[in-house]
Image: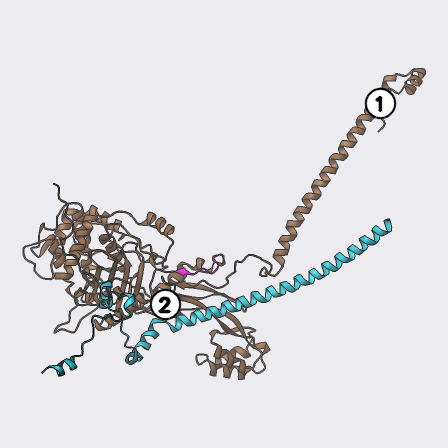
Amino acid sequence: MRNLAFVLSVLSVMGLAFWAYRENYRTQGEMAEVRALRDEIGRLRESLGVLRAEWAYLNRPDRLRELADMNFVRLGLLPLEPRQFGTIADIPYPLPPSSGGLAVIGEPVDTVAEQEARP
Amino acid sequence: MTRTPLRPLARILSARDRGENPDTIERENIRLRREALRDRSRQRAEGRLLLLGVAFLVAFAAVGLQMGALAASEPAEPRRATTGETIATQRADILDRQGRVLATNLVTHALYAQPQFMVDPLRAARELAAIFPDLDAERLKADFTGKRKFLWVKRKISPEQMQRVHEIGDPGLMFGPREMRLYPNGTLAAHVLGGAGFGREGVGSAEVIGTAGVEKAFDDYLRDPANGGAPLRLTLDLTVQAAVEEVLGGGMRLMNAKGAAAILMDAKTGEIVALASLPDFDPNSRPLPPTKGDAGDSPLFNRAVQGVYELGSTFKIFAIAQALDLGLVRPETMIDTKGPMVWGRFRIRDFHNYGPELSVRDVIVKSSNIGTAHVAQRIGGPRQQDFLRRLGFFQPTPIELVEAPGAKPLVPAKWPEITMLTVSYGHGVAASPLHLAAAYAAMVNGGTRVAPTIVQRSPAEAAAKSAATGGEALIRPETSAIIRGMLREVVQRGTASLGEVPGYAVGGKTGTADKPKPSGGYYKDKVVATFASVFPAHDPAYVLVVTLDEPVDTSGTEPRRTAGWTAVPVGAEIIRRVAPLMGLRPEVEPLAGAGVIRVRN
């Protein structure tokens, strides 16, 4: 009985040692991955910053103004003016959906035939 | 434990037999027993002390070891932190009120040399001078072949330049990463942003520190890693700022002015939407401050905040507002304007002769110095001084720029009667255009003092700040309404008639002040023209102050310098361009007197 307990405890110590050994290596592997991910996040954040800076640089008002001037023939862009404000009354009231576009007012009249039919 | 009896019978009997006193045996035993007890408790106490000592030793050793470890080990980023918080090492960005980037960072490299590792120092010097035209080949040769072991060659280089330096292939030329502050919009809002430079420099990294403007005023906030890189949001609007700078630059050239400043401010909150000062500079390569000449002529000088000028007739509105508020006059009260008004050896004149008397309303509309001086006489010096102090003309503005506390208004130390008269029409007190904008905002928004600010705050912070610095009622809302009507009439039929912008009901007041000579006295042909305006006058949303330095309009037969011909058209053009950008819809102005009139039945 005592021998059995002794053997069992030795076996369990060996098993635990093996488990700890594997956990240790797994942890180190995970840490390496975390490190790699963090480095990547840092790199991506840096390139994000560069892209944001580039976006801001390309959208700077001076450049947009020059582009609008250069492409004036095609785009015809001018600074915003007070008269460009519309009111809700400027928009036509929507037609009822059932008419399907233009409303039919009455039967079409063939004016040419009427003219010819006249004496 | 066996307990020894105090009087063991055997020993007592034998003692009695020997004729000794048996009590000595008892005492002996008591002594022994006490000694044993004492030894035991001493042992126990010593054990406890030892335990305590060991515990303290372990605790202090742990603390000491940890301190030693912290002090001796290399700092490392925590790798196992499980929180999602990120550690931002960069300086925080600066954004405008709609989140557009005003300042951000870019990674570049710095070039340094370690001549002792160089293979061919002469060739390296020659090729470096070819890549960087601003470097001197002879000087580099002397440095590379001399005794120096380390020198910085360039602080910031572009990737292309870095590649070309790589191609020299000399092991003594090395690169260190650098974070560089980038202002993508160039000169836009240069005076607000200021600029940044390098502080302490190492091979691996360098501190970026602000040198002026908000960059310096908020240096601690921008550099604090605890903010997690949260950007600083300004109240400026990029598009509005760009439009203001464009129009102001055009106006400055047309009016042949040597400098110009414009401030666009929210009339109710004091938030500054645009703040421009011309000439300006590029904060990406901030020029060095001038070593000679007038600092006020340097492009670095922020005319809107640092420049203190006598602002002329724009001050008249304060005297009139105070008199109205105190009930001394009413808009229809007739004021004596017979000129010239003689006070001691001084004579106060008007630009034209306006006849024997004018109503208070027309004193403002026609901008009569004599009329304003007569109104000021009714107010009296102490009350006038107190009112101007409450308007903020005696202290620097509280705006969050490093330059602001240095821009103290120039006020006379004593306040004799003649000072009271001249100050009423804007001579004798010199203040910055920002002071004027804040005071006008208070005049038109219903009489509440506002503190100019350039940083967006959360509503709670804003409430706390306005409770601390602003919020004080300076004049009654009814007086403010009368003032707004007067300012509107100045544009409709007065000195600022070129300031009319259809749909926006501009109200404003012009001011033309002769520039003081450094030697004393005033120039005859140099003025500072100011237009302080509010739009729309019936429901004030924004205050605009335009100041031109030494303008002259040469479109007519003779040169015109008054603000009505110089600053007012520029201000009107700014309003026409900027108001739609801020979403202000042109409105039909309500007729004067069409408001609801309370009638008692």
**For the point 22% across and 53% down, which residue is it?**
B443
Coordinates of residue B538 in the picture (x, y in percent): 20, 56
Picture coordinates of residue B62, whole percent (x, y): 66, 50
Q: Is residue A41 left or right of residue B241?
A: right
Give how far apart the Cα atoms at labels 2 and 1 are.
Answer: 100 Å
Name which residue lies at 5% across and 55% down.
B356
Q: Quadrant of the C terminus of chain A?
A: bottom left
Residue A21's disc number: none
Question: Chain for mark 2?
Answer: B
Q: Residue furthest left?
A: B356
Identify which residue, B540 or B192, lies in the foreground. Answer: B540
**Callout 1: SS:** helix
Marks 2 and 1 close (CB-CB < 8 Å) = no
Residue B563 seen in this snapshot: no
**Which chain is represented by cyan in the image?**
A
What's the residue type where badge 1 is placed?
A: Glu
| Residue bearing mark 1 | B28
Q: Which shade of the palette goes to chain B? A: brown
* Residue closer to the observer: B534 or B309: B534
Residue B237: percent from left, percent from top: 33, 64
How dense is the environment of label 2, judged by Cα within 10 Å: few (below 14), some, or many (20 and up)?
Answer: few
Membership of A97 in magenta stretch: no
Circle 2 sits on which residue?
A: B289
- Tags 2 and 1 both on a single chain: yes
- Magenta residues span B226-236
